[in-house]
């Protein structure tokens, strides 16, 4: 990824708003996303569920004629009930492990670095 953008939304206080949906919609138009990965909408964490709703609403709000990206959802805290697409990440497992281990506070709660092997 060539660019990472932080929106500086307050952790634990994130709320779905028209402004946030519009910001995401504009970002989708600007970057011409073909595929979006987002936490699934039945995740236990409320902000993970909100992220899924935000992406869905922003995609639905895209202008007529704008290519709609494919939305692929993944699990973090809560296992998916059904899967319709599986991606082999074997070539990237060391990068993923490093990324997961960087979240030290979460890894103290659960051994995510071990859980991702499932």
Image (cartoon, helix red, strand yellow):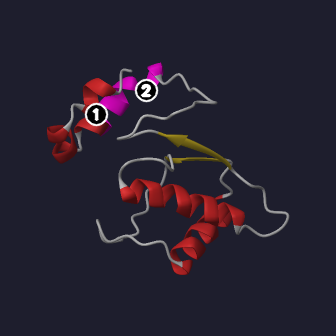
Element at badge 1? helix
Residue that label 2 marks: 92
Q: Position of residue 55 (x, y in %)?
A: 57, 59
Question: Residue 79's mark?
Answer: none
Say if 93 sits above or below 28 in the image. Answer: above
| Residue 102 position in % (x across, y down) | 23, 42
Please state the horizontal and vertical placement of residue 32, each as a whole percent of the image. Answer: 69, 57
Q: Position of residue 91 (x, y in %)?
A: 46, 21
Front residue of 80/5: it is: 80
Q: Is residue 91 magenta?
A: yes
- Residue 42 part of the magenta segment: no
Residue stretch rendered in magenta on the structure: 90-99
- Magenta span: chief secondary structure: helix
- Can you tell which mark lies on residue 98? 1
Residue 54 position (above or below residue 34): below
Query: Mark 2: which secondary structure?
Result: helix
- Mark 1 Cα within 10 Å, few/some/many (few <14, many 20+)? few
């Amino acid at each position: 990824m060539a660019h990472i953008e932080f929106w500086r939304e307050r952790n634990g206080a994130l709320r779905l708003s028209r402004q946030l949906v519009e910001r995401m919609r504009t970002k989708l138009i600007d970057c011409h996303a073909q595929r979006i990965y987002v936490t699934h909408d039945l995740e236990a964490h409320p902000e993970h569920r909100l992220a899924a709703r935000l992406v869905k609403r922003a995609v639905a709000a895209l202008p007529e004629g704008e290519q709609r990206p494919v939305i692929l959802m993944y699990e973090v805290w809560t296992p998916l009930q059904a899967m319709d697409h599986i991606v082999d990440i074997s070539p990237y497992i060391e990068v993923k492990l490093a990324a997961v281990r960087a979240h030290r506070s979460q890894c103290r709660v659960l051994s995510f670095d071990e859980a991702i092997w499932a």
